[in-house]
């Protein structure tokens, strides 16, 4: 096995494979930066180009591209508050808040370093999972997947403001997200829900226009109203020194970064949960690490931990998502579904053979993820100061560019003007939420988990009736969900008690 | 992408074209509108054709693919039907079940399938029901007589993963329990491997690799034929009465026209003829055949008149059959 592991590395380092990987990286770099144009679509567009390639070259190309998309997508999220990818929206909350405080360099440093850690953890997980992957994936059935969605929703508790009022708002926003997720034809009876006879709404609302609207538009409004640059009126030169600080932050909160990477990997391994989920669960977990009420309030205002969590998770999930794709021929995300098409084109049949006969190919994928991320992160660090300077450009100059990008980005959802309307409507919703002090993260969490929770609950009940509740992993996950909800309450009580003791 | 197409077109050895037709496509761009997102079967078929079609069109135009997803292709079909110009530069490829949407008067349908300028179909998709190999049933008959409920995993109404077993249950009396809500057919496959479900229906091409690995065993199929499943019993042939047979035939008819390709109504006859010929040749192109074989896609050209005949047959069913059909089948993906 060790032999296959090293052989995999040598395969990627052959000049042809390596050159194709670099080409993929360059492509992925831009795809990630541009909002809307997602890694999934690009993979589909690039698929025809691999017909003439050898398996190793083909995967180096596709995976090289895919592996860096989340990394550079984070950059757009941090700098402009515009989600570069559907999977990098969570980075906006604290990353962009830091940019507004003039800490763009530090935020970028943190997001890149944590992305790298995440990618390495994900790749390591892929390598280590090889012997145990089948029993692991098979032990998570529909009831377990439903409970994972519930644990995810429980994170709303830590994504909301403290106190009864804050919690209520958080869960209401989450409920709204769940409701928006039900739009479209339902998969059990085929009934059209909330479609108002509009064809566009039949297949539900696309996530990307919603994310762009709800996060980017309030930021643009804010930038226009302030009339300054993103970083405000800061003394020159304060930006540049931050990047290294961000890297140090990653190691200061190293265990948090590792834990969030593991969350990302785990969600990635579970087929059917999708890439948009992991970042929010990681963000919720990062928010839990706040020890005092004051620290808790700092999340969303530019706490570096809120950058590290999703930064790590959205890269580590790729390694995870490859696991079911390779071992079962069952893709863990929509990008992996397309990659699966690539397997066939390259003449490989995913399945148990990939863990035995073609083990070197599998390991070459691990290495591609590792190398692509190392190269991208290093390249980004070279450009980082220039990127951070964008936050000092006057708003009037920046806004037209961002507006064009988000309109195009939203339109790529379905190539339909409905995408633009959805973006504008949710832009208004997002702006009202910001003004009214309602948290946006729970809404998005409800939206991304709504379909998953609904479908797996239906399947669980239809298949097992009430018996699904007694499955051991389900019980563990129920306990976990309760713990996740109660944790912030206990924490805030403890911190209040501590404060009271200090005053006494 | 466009450059790659031009490159391939450039290398293609193809010359004998009448000068008059040459002008029609020279320097033009042909757009294939796909009614689904990137990455699915319809999209992949359109993209592979876009790569090889230029070789066979006079003047070697660029052929590009535009995805127009939404409402299970109705949006794209409405677009090609009435928004696009009938200038031979727009091709549409949609959900094969659109004809059923028209038949059952789904709201939002603003087209008449018979009036499109039909190019033909690029493949037929055969639906089979495959059961876990470790189950004791060797055939559909054994399953039907087995007595124990067989759990079927499905995506949702309107998809063949749902509709095909539904008719087996309702019309042929198989003891099936359909559990729907899985997000894709590969999700169902995983549920099958962990024994959450016992069987799944789906296109044979999507099941083939699992059949070869011995995970599942196909036991019954719908009308459309593919190599490897000729010997399976056909659902229609087991129907207890003519009405049940008609309903099953209606459900599977669109699968025979599995990848429909059409142009805007009113497209001039000479252009349509050029396009039909180019399609027929492109699908037999050795490079395309090699590529599609690699990608696990089985393309086969069905001429326009054959496709149109099936479409007309579907739309000319008596009202009582259509009403009964509508009770079971809802238009969907």
Image (cartoon, coloured by chain):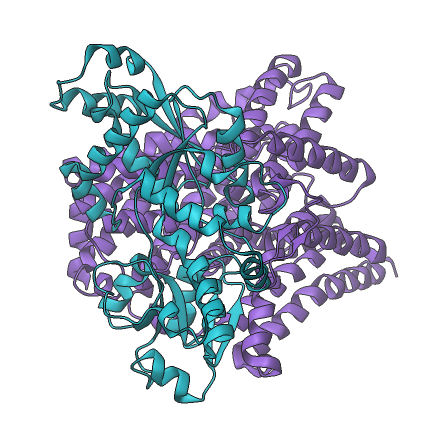
Q: Position of residue A49 (x, y in %)?
A: 25, 35
**Left or right of B5 on screen, residue A498:** right
Which chain is tinted purple?
A
Which chain is tinted cyan?
B
Q: A393 or B189: nearer the eye?
A: B189
Q: Specify the quadrant that holds the N terminus of chain A.
A: bottom left
Q: Quadrant of residue B186?
A: bottom left
Q: Position of residue B328 (x, y in %)?
A: 56, 64
Q: A414 or B203: nearer the eye?
A: B203
Reply above or below: A476 against A152. below
Q: Position of residue A415 (x, y in %)?
A: 52, 31
What is the residue that sits farthest to the right in this orientation? A504
Reply above or below: B122 against A213. below
Q: Decide if residue A269 is in sight here.
A: no
Reply above or below: A59 against B18. below
Numbered circles on residues, count: 0
Q: Specify the quadrant that holds the C terminus of chain A.
A: bottom right
**Left or right of B155 on screen, residue A123:** left
- Please report the residue visible at 15 percent of the width from the left and 36 percent of the height from the top: A15
- Please report the residue visible at 71 percent of the width from the left and 31 percent of the height from the top: A218
- Please report the residue visible at 35 percent of the width from the left and 82 percent of the height from the top: B141
Q: Decide if residue B173 is in sight here.
A: yes
Q: Quadrant of residue A358?
A: bottom left
- Please report the residue visible at 52 percent of the width from the left and 44 percent of the height from the top: A87
Q: Position of residue A448 (x, y in %)?
A: 59, 51
């Amino acid at each position: 096995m060790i032999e296959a592991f090293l052989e995999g590395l040598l395969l990627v380092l052959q000049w042809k494979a390596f050159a194709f990987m670099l080409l993929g990286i360059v492509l992925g770099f831009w795809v990630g930066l541009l909002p809307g144009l997602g890694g999934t679509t690009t993979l589909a567009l690039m698929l025809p180009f691999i017909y003439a390639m050898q398996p190793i070259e083909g995967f180096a190309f596709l995976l090289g591209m895919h592996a860096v998309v989340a990394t550079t997508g984070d950059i757009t999220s941090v700098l402009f508050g515009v989600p570069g990818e559907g999977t990098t929206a969570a980075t906006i909350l604290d990353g962009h808040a830091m940019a507004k405080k003039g800490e763009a360099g530090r935020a970028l440093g943190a997001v890149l370093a944590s992305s790298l850690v995440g990618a390495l953890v994900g790749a390591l997980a892929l390598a280590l999972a090889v012997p145990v992957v089948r029993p692991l994936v098979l032990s998570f059935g529909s009831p377990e997947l439903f409970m994972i969605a519930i644990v995810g929703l429980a994170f709303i508790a830590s994504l909301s403001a403290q106190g009864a009022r804050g919690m209520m708002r958080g869960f209401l926003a989450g409920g709204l997200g769940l409701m928006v997720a039900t739009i479209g034809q339902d998969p059990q009876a085929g009934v059209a829900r909330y479609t108002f006879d509009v064809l566009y709404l039949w297949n539900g609302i696309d996530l990307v226009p919603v994310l762009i609207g709800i996060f980017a538009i309030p930021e643009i409004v804010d930038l226009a109203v302030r009339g300054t640059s993103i970083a405000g009126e800061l003394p020159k030169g304060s930006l540049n020194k931050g990047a290294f600080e961000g890297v140090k932050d990653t190691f200061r909160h190293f265990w948090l970064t590792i834990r969030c990477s593991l969350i990302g990997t785990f969600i990635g391994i579970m087929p059917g949960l999708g890439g948009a989920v992991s970042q929010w669960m990681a963000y919720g977990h990062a928010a839990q690490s706040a020890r005092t009420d004051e620290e808790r309030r700092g999340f969303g205002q530019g706490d570096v931990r809120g950058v590290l969590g999703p930064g790590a998770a959205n890269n580590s999930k790729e390694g995870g998502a490859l696991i079911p794709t390779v071992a079962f021929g069952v893709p863990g995300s929509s990008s992996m579904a397309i990659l699966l098409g690539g397997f066939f084109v390259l003449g490989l049949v995913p399945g148990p053979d990939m863990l035995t006969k073609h083990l070197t190919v599998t390991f070459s994928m691990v290495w591609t993820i590792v190398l692509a991320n190392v190269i991208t992160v290093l390249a980004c660090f070279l450009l980082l100061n220039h990127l951070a300077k964008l936050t000092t450009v006057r708003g009037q100059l920046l806004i037209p560019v961002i507006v064009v990008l988000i309109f195009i980005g939203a339109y790529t959802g379905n190539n339909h003007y409905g995408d633009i309307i959805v973006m504008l409507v949710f832009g208004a919703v997002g702006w009202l939420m910001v003004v009214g002090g309602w948290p946006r993260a729970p809404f998005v969490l409800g939206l991304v988990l709504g379909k998953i929770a609904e479908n797996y609950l239906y399947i669980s009940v239809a298949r097992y009736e009430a018996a699904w509740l007694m499955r051991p992993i389900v019980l563990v996950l129920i306990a976990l969900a309760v713990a996740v909800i109660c944790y912030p309450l206990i924490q805030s009580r403890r911190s209040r008690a501590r404060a009271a003791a200090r005053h006494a | 992408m466009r450059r790659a197409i031009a490159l391939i077109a450039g290398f293609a050895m193809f010359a004998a074209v009448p000068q008059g037709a040459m002008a029609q496509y020279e320097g033009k761009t042909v757009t294939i509108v796909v009614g689904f997102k990137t990455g699915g079967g319809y999209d992949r078929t359109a993209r592979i054709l876009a790569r090889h079609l230029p070789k066979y069109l006079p003047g070697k135009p660029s052929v590009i693919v535009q995805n127009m997803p939404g409402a299970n292709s109705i949006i794209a079909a409405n677009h090609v039907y009435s928004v696009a110009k009938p200038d031979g530069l727009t091709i549409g490829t949609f959900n094969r079940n659109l004809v059923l949407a028209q038949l059952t008067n789904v709201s939002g349908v603003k087209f008449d399938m018979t009036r499109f300028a039909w190019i033909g179909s690029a493949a037929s998709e055969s639906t089979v029901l495959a059961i876990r190999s470790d189950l004791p049933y060797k055939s559909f008959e054994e399953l039907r007589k087995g007595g124990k409920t067989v759990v079927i995993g499905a995506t949702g109404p309107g998809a063949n993963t749902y509709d095909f077993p539904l008719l087996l249950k309702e019309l042929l009396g198989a003891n099936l329990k359909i559990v729907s809500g899985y997000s894709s057919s590969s999700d169902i496959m995983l549920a099958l491997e962990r024994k959450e479900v016992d069987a799944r229906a789906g296109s044979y091409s999507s099941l083939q690799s699992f059949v070869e690995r011995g995970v599942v065993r196909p036991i019954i199929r719908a009308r459309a034929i593919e190599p490897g499943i000729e010997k399976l019993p056909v659902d229609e042939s087991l129907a207890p009465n003519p009405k049940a047979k008609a309903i099953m035939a209606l459900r599977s008819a669109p699968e025979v026209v599995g990848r429909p390709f059409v142009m805007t109504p009113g497209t001039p006859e000479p252009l349509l003829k050029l396009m039909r010929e180019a399609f027929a040749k492109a699908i037999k192109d050795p490079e395309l055949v090699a590529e599609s074989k690699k990608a696990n896609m089985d393309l086969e050209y069905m001429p326009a008149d054959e496709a149109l005949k099936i479409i007309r047959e579907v739309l000319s069913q008596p009202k009582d059959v259509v009403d009964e059909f509508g009770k079971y089948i809802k238009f969907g993906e």
